[in-house]
Image (spheres, rainbow, N blue to C red):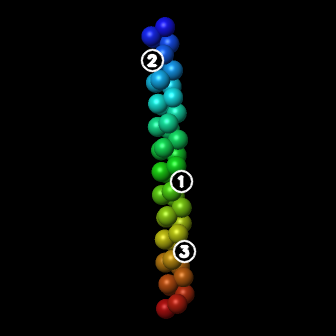
Amino acid sequence: MKALIRREFQTSATKLKLEFQTSRFNELKARTTEKQWTVALSDIAD
């Protein structure tokens, strides 16, 4: 029974980790896109 609980815990911990990494990646991607737009707009302004 303990082994089963441990495995369940590891599985949910792994899922959480993956979700966290995915959300961080998406946030970074969004920020990068934002920066590119800002740079593009400032280039136009010049």
Task: Give the mark toward the camera: 1 or 3.
Answer: 1
Q: Which of marks 2 and 1 is nearer the N terminus?
A: 2
Q: Earlier in the sequence, mark 3 or mark 2?
A: 2
- Residue at the (47%, 23%) spot, across then down: 9
Secondary structure beneath label 2: helix
Secondary structure beneath label 3: helix
Residue 1 location, x and y as percent? 49, 8
Residue 40 location, x and y as percent? 53, 79
Q: Give the residue type that dot 2 points to.
A: Arg
* Viewer-side residue, 9 vs 33: 9
Q: Give the residue type that dot 3 points to.
A: Trp
Rendered position, 34 above or below 1:
below
Q: Residues within 10 Å of mark 3 (few under 14, many from 20)?
A: few
Q: Residues within 10 Å of mark 2 (few under 14, many from 20)?
A: few
Task: Give the mark toward the camera: 3 or 2.
Answer: 2
Q: Earlier in the sequence, mark 1 or mark 3?
A: 1
For label 3, the residue is 37
| Label placed on residue 12 | none
Q: Quadrant of residue 33?
A: bottom right
Q: Give the residue type that dot 1 points to.
A: Asn
- Residue at the (48%, 58%) spot, across then down: 28
Rendered position, 16 above or below 26:
above
Q: Compute the Cα span from label 1 to label 3.
A: 17 Å
Contact between marks 2 and 1 (CB within 8 A): the answer is no
For label 2, the residue is 6
For label 1, the residue is 26
- Residue at the (48%, 16%) spot, across then down: 5
- Residue at the (46%, 37%) spot, across then down: 17
Q: Compute the Cα span from label 2 to label 1.
A: 30 Å
Q: Which residue lies furthest to the bottom in this view?
A: 46
